[in-house]
Every structure is written in structure tokens, then in C-alpha cells.
Amino acid sequence: MSAPTEPRRRGAAVETTVLDTTIALLAERGAAITVDDIAAASGVHKTTIYRRFETRERLVAAAIRRLGELEVPPVDASDPRAALEALAVSVAAALRSPRAGNILRAAIAASAATPELVALADEFFRDRYELAREPLQRLVDAGVIRRDLDAIIVWEQIVNPMHVRTLCGRSTGDDAARQLVELAVRGARP
């Protein structure tokens, strides 16, 4: 029996390959990609993909989650205002990349036709918005932000304009991201 020419990839390595391939294909082709496309481009059999992700929608959601984790990592919240600005700048920078913009547009378009993607997109945003909860809570505790406001709504006031700008083909610079933080925090003062 001859030895395989390439070692078999297992577990996390296979998932990373599949997710990175999915990100690349989403950025290039949009949400119309199929599991067959991903399998062919990644060199992983589609049954292996389905064993790990169950549906194409779950695979797309997992790939977008991976991209979010890579592009917008958690920040040090010791200075909550600086942490919010760092997160906002990180989101703006991520959305300026052509692949993130293309993926955001593709995900929004696909969500309109796929109820499962709507639920997965909502879950994605809730999880990613949690990055801002601690610094915002520290601003609440310091009396900078009103206690009766939901911290996530304050964060949405910062990032949602960036998402809309990206959907419209416009970018958000770092200074604009900082201004969005300033406007949201100022508007949330007691």
C-alpha cells in the first residue's frame, strides 16, 4: 500500500481550512457559494463539512464569526473610553477591507432570503457586541453613562452607522469611528 502524498488533516486544522476557504469565497463570490464550491476549493470532502457544520448557513455563519474574531479582537478595558475607541477603530478598519465589505453585503442579501441566516446573524451580532459590554458597564459605574440605558444599544449607536456606510460602499475612517464613540457617549450621559 502506498503512502498518501499529503498527510490527512484532522479536527481544528480541517475546520480552519474550511472556514478560511469559505471567507475567501464569500469575499470573492458573495453568498451564492455552495458547499460543493467550498469543498472543491478547500480540498475537504463535503460530507466532512456537513459533519462539522450541518447546513451551508451554519458554515457561512461560522466563517463570518471567525472573520469577526480575527479582525476585531477583545481589547483591554482598564480604560473603558479608550477600550470603546479601540473597538470602534478596529471595527472600522475591518469594514474597510474589501473582503469584509463584500461579506457584509453578501450576508445581508442572503439573510433576506434565508430565515436561518437571520437568526444566525442576530446571534453573531449579539456575541460580537458583548465585546463592548464591559467597557460600557464601567462607564455606567463611573457615572459617565446613564444606568437606565442598555449598553448594547449604546454600542449599536457606534457600530451600526459603520455597517450602513459599508453597505453603501463608503468607508469609516479611524477619526470618524472615534467621533461615533464621542457622540454615543455624550448622548448617553446622565
Image (cartoon, grey):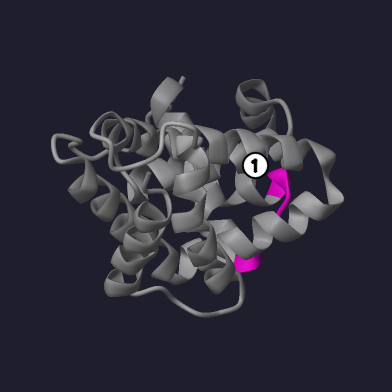
**Residue depicted at x 57% and y 60%:** 103
Q: Quadrant of residue 136?
A: top left
Q: Badge 1, how many Cα within 10 Å: few under 14, some, many 20+?
A: many
**Residue depicted at x 51% and y 35%:** 150
Closest to the observer: 157 or 94?
157
Mark yes or no: residue 44 visible. no
Mark yes or no: residue 68 visible. yes
From the image, which quarter does the C terminus lie in?
top left
Pointer 1 residue: 121
Q: Is residue 156 left or right of residue 92?
A: right
Tell me residue 35's x, y (percent).
70, 43
Residue 188 magenta-drawn? no
Residue type for callout 1: Ala
Tell me residue 189's x, y (percent).
36, 48
**Residue depicted at x 60% and y 70%:** 167
- Secondary structure of the residue carrying numbered label 1: helix
The boundaries of the magenta stretch are: 28-36
Tell me residue 76's x, y (percent).
17, 37
Closest to the observer: 49 or 64?
64
Closest to the observer: 36 or 110?
110
Tell me residue 46's x, y (percent).
68, 35
Residue 31 magenta-drawn? yes
